[in-house]
Amino acid sequence: MRPIDLSLGSRTEGGWTVVDVKGEVDLFTAPKLREHIVGLVEDDERRIIVNLEDVEFMDSTGLGVLVGALKRLKEKDGHLALVCPQGSVLRVLTVTGLNKVFAIYASVEEATTADVG
Amino acid sequence: MTERSESFLIEFPPEAHYVSTARIFAAGVARTYGADEDLVEDLKIAVSEACTNAIRAREGGTVNGPVRLSARRKAQLLSFEAEDAGILPPGPGAEPVIPSTGSTSEDIIRRLSLETIRALFPNTEIVPNDQGGGNIRFSLSLPAARSPA
């Protein structure tokens, strides 16, 4: 069995919890990302940035996790932002139209300084 | 002279960690015929979606056996086909991609998956298979006058 090609870390920056994701997000690895984000929301984190800068690949399984996170946070009047500067992840967000659903930024700095209300 | 066609097949157990193997297979075949890297990235997404659907169908018990992903090159066309679920998915535009309230994550993923393949490869077809379901088939155009590397 292949090792899980996904590493996750959390840090606080500018009043946001930043989830740094590195690797590939697919059917095999998406549950790990889901579990991580759900844990943060259950710990009452309300402002979460998912940093996808170092994600080499993501399919709709990963998008489903992000949509689920957005729904959970909205239910708690929270905010979810994505950092996704370029590449195939931005491509999949664009072709699915989800770039219109998520707040997407080019960098963590840009996301933390954005006026999200 | 008749144009020769070449075929490739990967068959793997319906387990999630093999989806990346399927992506590597598809990308390798496409690169062999000189496909542009942007196209290879799109192909990896589409193959990942198709194989994910196939694995989910087997988890759901609608289809049994290994997942098969085939590739066939004929002239400047490279076609991929993955065996999918026993239930034929709705046609394009049947539902919006953007999820509505009340959708479960599973619903969202399933809908996103097929819509993603169709968005990346508008020639995507659902071909009926002998298990009463549909295979997902799509093709990409290869650059002209390029021999396999």
Image (cartoon, coloured by chain):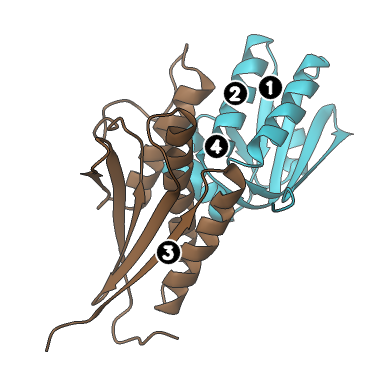
Chain colours: A cyan, B brown
Q: Chain of mark 4?
A: A
Q: Residues at badges 4 and 3 in contact (C-beta under 8 Å)?
A: no
- Residue at the front extreme? B65
Circle 1: element type: strand
Q: Which badge, 2 or 4, comes first in the chain's sequence?
A: 4
Q: Do marks 2 and 4 share a subunit?
A: yes
Residue position marked by numbered label 2 in the rendering: A68
Frontmost residue, B138 versus A106: B138
Q: Do marks 1 and 3 share a subunit?
A: no
Q: Residues at badges 2 and 4 in contact (C-beta under 8 Å)?
A: no
User: Does residue B7 lie above or below B41 as drawn?
Assistant: below
Q: Do marks 4 and 1 share a subunit?
A: yes
What percent of the width, then of the height, locates residue B105? 53, 23
At label 1, counting other C-alpha atoms closer than 10 Å, the crowd grade (few under 14, some 14-19, many 20 or more) is many
User: Does residue B45 lie above or below B3 as drawn?
Assistant: above
What percent of the width, then of the height, locates residue A96? 43, 39
Residue B93 in which image quadrant: top left
Frontmost residue, A78 versus A114: A78
Residue position marked by numbered label 3 in the rendering: B39
State the quadrant of the C terminus of chain A.
Answer: top right
Circle 2: element type: helix
Q: Which badge, 4 or 1, comes first in the chain's sequence?
A: 4
Question: Would you say B98 lies left or right of A56 here?
Answer: left
Residue position marked by numbered label 4 in the rendering: A61
Tell me how far mark 1 sits from mark 2, CA to CA: 13 Å
The kind of residue tagged 3 is: Leu
Tell me how far mark 4 sits from mark 3, CA to CA: 20 Å
At label 2, counting other C-alpha atoms closer than 10 Å, the crowd grade (few under 14, some 14-19, many 20 or more) is many
Residue shown at 27%/30% (left/top)?
Answer: B90
